[in-house]
Image: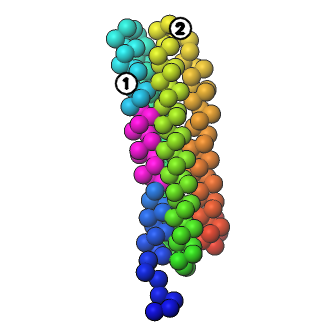
Amino acid sequence: MAGISPVDPLLLASAGVSLGIIGGLIGSTIGIARAASAGLSVLSEDAAQFKWVLLLSSLPMTQTFYGFIFTLLGLTFIPTAQVTLAKGVAIFVIGLGVMLAELYSAVYQGSVCMSGIVELPKTKGRISTSTMILASYIELFGILGMVFGYLLLVVVAGLSI
């Protein structure tokens, strides 16, 4: 039985790129829940802050889109690639990296947004712009996870962009 793989390389690669959306969904859910929970407390004190609470608590949602884009692009070109077991494992590991990037980016962005939301009543909303700027730094890691993951997929699969 030498040379026969117990694992289907195409299935392994497909599962790997699917991890991107999974990380985005889980991370966004946790990040939004943290920020929105803080928002409820703030709104009980100052209902006029609703627009900022809504905006800041929705920021971690974008990592779901990045994970979706990575997964969609990966699933569209993997079937056309010659996926060996080594490539399947490499693609799975790349997907795992994207999953972690999207997950942690969304969770920690939610924490930053939560901290800013808590301060909205004290600052009468003036903290909102600063919070969005600081949260965008964490957002960058979600974007980089998607872009680097896709570029690595292209290199591993031996395809042209």
Rendered location of residue 8, percent (x, y) = 44, 77
Indicate how the structure is coloured in the image. rainbow
User: Which label sits in the foreground, 2 or 1?
Assistant: 1
Q: Is residue 76 visible?
A: no
Please, what secondary structure does the residue beneath circle 2 have? helix
**x, y (%) of residue 113?**
50, 26
Number of residues whose C-alpha sits closer than 10 Å to that of mark 2, classed few (under 14), some (14–19) or many (20 or more):
few
Which quadrant holds residue 141?
top right
CA gap between label 2 and label 1 equals 19 Å
What residue is pinned by disc 2?
123
- Image side of residue 144 versus residue 28, left or right: right
Residue at left 44%, top 31%?
58
Q: Quadrant of the C terminus?
A: bottom right
Residue 55, numbered label: none
Which amino acid, by three-letter code, is at mark 1? Ser
Return the residue at label 1: 37
Asked if 102 appears above or below 50 in the picture, the reply is: below
Secondary structure category for the residue under label 1? helix
The answer to whether residue 19 shows anywhere in this view is yes
Q: Residue at x 51, y 46 (%)?
A: 102
Furthest-bottom residue in view? Answer: 1
Q: Position of residue 156 (x, y in %)?
A: 62, 69
Mark 2 belongs to which amino acid? Answer: Thr
> Which residues lie in the magenta part?
20-32
Q: Residues within 10 Å of mark 1 (few under 14, many from 20)?
A: some
Whole-percent x and y of residue 86? Answer: 57, 75
Counting every numbered tag in the picture gives 2
Magenta segment, prevailing SS (helix, strand or loop): helix
Task: Name the residue nearer the viewer: 93 or 50.
Answer: 93
